[in-house]
Amino acid sequence: MGSQMNNNGGFRAKMEHYMYSGEKKHVMAGMAIIGVIFGVPWYLMNRGTKHSSHQDYLEKADRARNARLHSAPPASK
C-alpha cells in the first residue's frame, strides 16, 4: 500500500482534516499561508517604486510629450 498509508489515513485525509477542522491553529496556519502567497508577489511588485497620483502621471506625460514635440526637426513640405 505504500508508506503514506497508515492508521491515520493518507495525505488527502490529513489535508481534509486540516482544511475542515476549524481548529484555531489550523485556521491561523491557513491565514499565514494565504498571506505569504499574496504578500510575496505584492512586495516584489511594489519595492522601489514611488506611488504617485494620477495628476503626477499626467504632468509627467505632458512634459515628455512637450519635450518630444519641441525636439523634433521641422517637417519639410
Image (cartoon, rainbow, N blue to C red):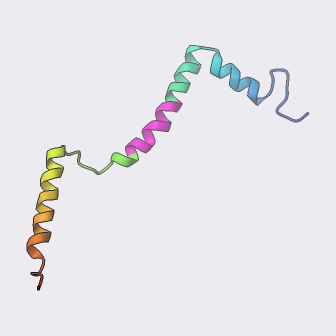
Q: Is 69 left or right of 14, judged from the image as shown?
A: left
Tell me, yes or no, whether the highlighted magenta stretch contains residue 24. Answer: no
Residue lying at 14% horizontally and 49% vertically, measured from the top left: 56
Give the residues in magenta: 33-43
Residue lying at 11% horizontally and 70% vertically, measured from the top left: 69
Residue at the farthest right position: 1
Tell me, yes or no, whether the highlighted magenta stretch contains residue 38. Answer: yes
Residue 46 or residue 57, whichever sits in front: 57
Q: Is 62 left or right of 37, judged from the image as shown?
A: left
Residue lying at 8% horizontally and 72% vertically, measured from the top left: 70
- Which quadrant, please, contains the N terminus? top right
- Which quadrant, please, contains the C terminus? bottom left
Determine the main secondary structure of the stretch shown in magenta. helix
Q: Is residue 59 above or below residue 13?
A: below
Q: Is residue 33 above or below residue 20?
A: below
Residue lying at 20% horizontally and 45% vertically, measured from the top left: 52
The image position of residue 71, as x and y in percent, is: 10, 75
Q: Is 26 left or right of 55, judged from the image as shown?
A: right
The image position of residue 31, as x and y in percent, is: 50, 25
The image position of residue 72, as x and y in percent, is: 13, 77
